[in-house]
């Protein structure tokens, strides 16, 4: 009897230990968000390292019902897919050391389309694949803009693709812009007097995909995607 009791206690203790995860998701594991049908929206779920050691997390796309006509991408700590990947796509994050947090970020723009889409990504410990959890994004592109207001705060960039210079124009005044590469790193920033249009010298930036964000007195307005060609 004592041996049986000992085995049961050991079993439950072992199960409890193995039920623990090496990371936690925050602010939560699911984001439900209404998004602008004509702008880029960025939605991030982070992972906090609980292992007490270096943690390498893998990711796998397990569900993707986002409309194929929508633009966007998925980025993780250390890498970007460059698009919203199909189910079955896998990758791994850069190592999480100490207080460094990981993340999975969905960026999406319906390009004027409407509807609802879901993205679900499984995040797991590369050294223990059974130790994992899922992150879910449910995005709703709603037709809430009246005909009279449809052009409010619309931004666009040209030429696209760009070469040495790109122009940014909006229907509302703005006074600063920031340019980010596909990894989410800020590569250019410019502050100026209120205007509806400005030009950006792309300087030594390499060819590739970039995002330009416009701001009015520090308040974010729009994100637009453009490409630099050789």
Image (cartoon, rainbow, N blue to C red):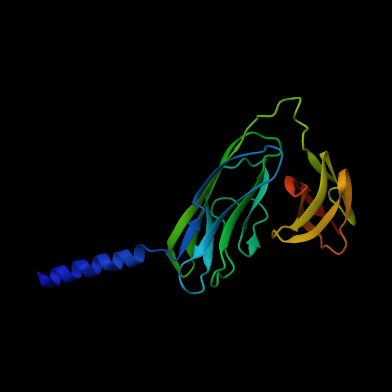
Taking depth in this image into account, of 157 and 178 the one nearest to the observer is: 178
Residue 141 in view of the camera: yes
Classify residue 167 as left or right of residue 116: right
Q: Residue at x 78, y 48 (%)?
A: 217
Q: Which residue is rendered at x = 77% and y = 37% of the image? A: 153
Please identify the residue farthest to the top as the structure is shown: 147
Query: Residue visible at 17% across and 71% down?
Result: 6
Q: Which quarter of the image is occupied by the C terminus? A: bottom right
Question: Percent x, y for residue 19?
Answer: 35, 62
Q: Nearer the viewer, residue 93 or 65?
A: 93
Q: Quadrant of residue 77?
A: bottom right
Which sits in the foreground, 60 or 216? 216
Quadrant for residue 128, please give it.
bottom left
Residue 93 image offset from top left, x and y in percent = 58, 65
Residue 159 visible at all: no
How many badges with numbers are in the image?
Answer: 0
Quarter-wise, where is residue 39 in the image? top right
What percent of the width, then of the height, locates residue 58?
53, 63
Taking the spot 55% from the left edge, 51% from the top edge, the residue there is 87
Q: Position of residue 225 (x, y in %)?
A: 76, 49
Q: Quadrant of the N terminus?
A: bottom left
- Residue extending furthest toward the left: 1
In the picture shown, does residue 207 fall above or below 99? above
- 173 relative position to 57: left or right: right
């Amino acid at each position: 009897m004592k041996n049986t009791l000992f085995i049961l206690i050991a079993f439950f203790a072992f199960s409890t230990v193995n039920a623990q995860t090496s990371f936690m998701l925050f602010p939560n594991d699911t984001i439900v968000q209404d998004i602008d049908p004509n702008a880029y929206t960025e939605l991030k779920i982070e992972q906090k390292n609980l292992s007490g050691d270096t943690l390498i997390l893998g990711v796998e796309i397990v569900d993707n019902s986002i409309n194929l006509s929508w633009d966007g991408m998925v980025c993780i700590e250390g890498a970007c897919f460059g698009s919203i990947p199909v189910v079955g796509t896998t990758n791994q994050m850069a190592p999480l050391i100490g207080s460094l947090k990981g993340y999975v970020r969905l960026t999406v723009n319906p390009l004027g389309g409407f509807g609802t889409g879901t993205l679900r990504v499984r995040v797991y410990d590369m050294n223990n694949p059974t130790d994992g959890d899922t992150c879910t994004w449910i995005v709703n592109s709603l037709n809430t803009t009246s005909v009279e207001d449809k052009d409010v705060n619309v931004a666009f960039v040209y030429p696209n693709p760009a070469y040495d210079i790109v122009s940014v124009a909006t229907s509302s005044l703005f006074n600063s812009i920031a340019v980010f590469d596909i990894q989410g790193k800020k590569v250019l920033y410019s502050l100026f007097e209120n205007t509806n249009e400005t030009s950006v010298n792309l300087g030594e930036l390499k060819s590739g995909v970039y995002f330009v964000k416009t701001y009015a007195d520090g308040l974010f307005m729009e994100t637009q995607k453009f490409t630099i060609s050789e």
